[in-house]
Image (cartoon, rainbow, N blue to C red):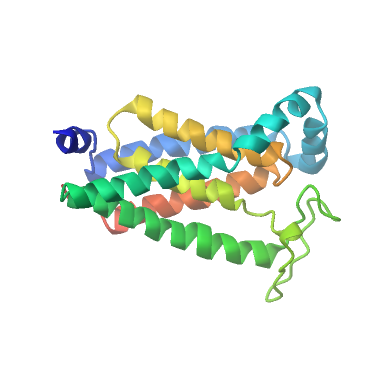
Amino acid sequence: MLAQKLISQIDVQERAVNRRMFEVAGLFAVAFCCWSLLVNDEIGSSQALLASDWFKTTRPWFEATTDVFLYVFYLLFFSLLVFGFVTHQALLRGLVWRYLAAQLLGSVLVVRLLKMLLGRGRPNSDLPGEFTGEWGVWTFDAGFHAMPSGHSADVFTGAVLLALVLKSRQLRFLLLGIAILAGCSRVAVAAHWPSDVLVGGLIGSCCAYALMRLYPLRT
């Protein structure tokens, strides 16, 4: 009974998946418009924001929760995997395998390579915001692994993958809202710049969509 209710909330038709991806694209369009207000002085504007009273007040909360956002999606997909095996639901197992593949492609391969290649200084590094990497010269200092944000890529992979298949708009917006909070937390704890979060989230979202399009789920 529970398995059928869960399956009934999932719609993997190609047209539906594409339509939901437009919702995600709209979200990123708004985010990029907001970021464009900072683009001329992203470093200075971000540092001023971090020094504001509001951020100083909320920072302890973000520090306590910034890693929790990752485990929310790890737990969700682990539960789906176990439930898929117990109830013999190939649809649920297939969704988890695509999540793992998207994570390996985006968060592990693309993000890690770009971090080492670009070498952008984190807010607390000696050269905040600067790109020190050169083509073919790898930067292994974690203090210069700001671009792109691995947390954001990780969380957006899970959020977008689920948002692409869920019928409920409320659930989709809730998951994407969690991903946005996760991205904001990375800026609030002075681990990343806003553009790092945007690029990381975009990588995770594109990888999730690519896996769903290249290897569509079948009901």
Question: Where is residue 54, by image quadrant?
Answer: top right
Q: Nearer the viewer, residue 77 or 143?
A: 77
* Residue 21 x/y as whole percent: 38, 40
Asked whether, in this view, residue 212 is left or right of residue 112, the answer is: left
- 160 with respect to 136 (left or right): left
Q: Is residue 38 above or below residue 128?
A: above
Residue 206, above or below 118: above
Q: Position of residue 43 (x, y in %)?
A: 79, 43
Whole-percent x, y for residue 114 in the image:
62, 63
Residue 159 falls left or right of residue 53:
left
Task: Relative to 132, say whether 154 is above or below.
Answer: above
The answer to whether residue 184 is visible is no
Residue farthest to the bottom, as pictured:
136
**Can residue 99 be seen in this snapshot?**
yes
Residue 195 percent location from the top left of the image: 66, 45
For the point 77% across and 55% down, which residue is it? 121
Residue 5: which quarter of the image?
Answer: top left
Q: Residue at x 25, y 53 (%)?
A: 93
Q: Identify which residue, 148 or 3, lies in the foreground.
A: 3
Residue projecting furthest to the right? 126
The N terminus lies in quadrant? top left
Residue that appears at 57% across and 59% down: 111
Query: In the image, what residue occupies the spot 65% across and 48% down?
Result: 196
In the image, 37 versus 53, the foreground residue is 53
